[in-house]
Image (cartoon, rainbow, N blue to C red):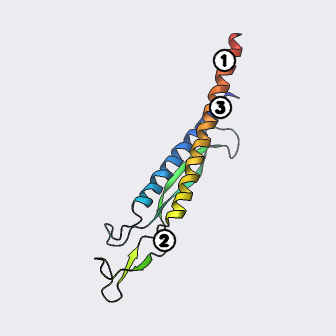
Amino acid sequence: MAGWGLSATGISASGMAAERRRMEVISNNIANANSTRSANGEPYRRQFVVFSAEQDPLSMEDGALSGVKVEGVQPDLSPFNEVHMPGHPDADPTTGMVKMPNVKLPNEMVDLITASRSYEANLKALSLFKEMVEQTLTLLRGR
């Protein structure tokens, strides 16, 4: 039972850290939604976080999980959007088309809300665990 409690807090804490990283990446995507030129000369390319389940190396059970691991941040390889803006400095001289980032703001907002709610759910789980421990200690003291 004690091992369950520690792994429960670890799982929730790792979930919160992973969702925080996801919100940072989404915020960066939103901030660069109109950046037509990045360091490599191309428009900003949307990024996304890759998660994996982390195995508990100390558990005697096969497949026991200890949390969420952020594997990394990957670029979204979907094509750039093109907009006709002949006067733009990054416009193609012959067609007047400007390559825009592949960031879709409605999708980013949905992802941001989802990440925020997942963070809140993990925070609630930690809070409930803390309350359970406090109640258990109160009962053990005989109050």
N-term-proximal mark, 3 vs 1: 3
* Mark 1 burial class by Cα count in 10 Å: few <14, some 14-19, many 20+: few
* Residue occupied by mark 2: 77
Check the image and report above or below for 71 versus 35.
above
Residue 111 in percent (x, y) is at 55, 57
Q: Kindly indicate the quadrant of the structure image that contains residue 37.
A: bottom left
Question: Could you tell me the amino acid type at mark 1?
Answer: Leu
> What secondary structure is marked by label 1?
helix
Q: Looking at the image, which residue is at 52% across and 51% down?
A: 70
Q: Quadrant of the C terminus?
A: top right
Query: In which quarter of the view is residue 81 placed?
Result: bottom left
Task: Give me the residue at 42% from left, 57% from top.
Answer: 28
Mark whose residue sits in front, 2 or 3:
3
Q: Residues within 10 Å of mark 2 (few under 14, many from 20)?
A: few
Q: Is residue 28 left or right of residue 59?
A: left
Looking at the image, residue 17 lies above or below residue 77: above
Rounded to the nearest angstrom, the CA distance separating label 1 from label 2 is 53 Å
Q: Are marks 2 and 3 in contact (CB under 8 Å)?
A: no
Residue 137's tag is 1
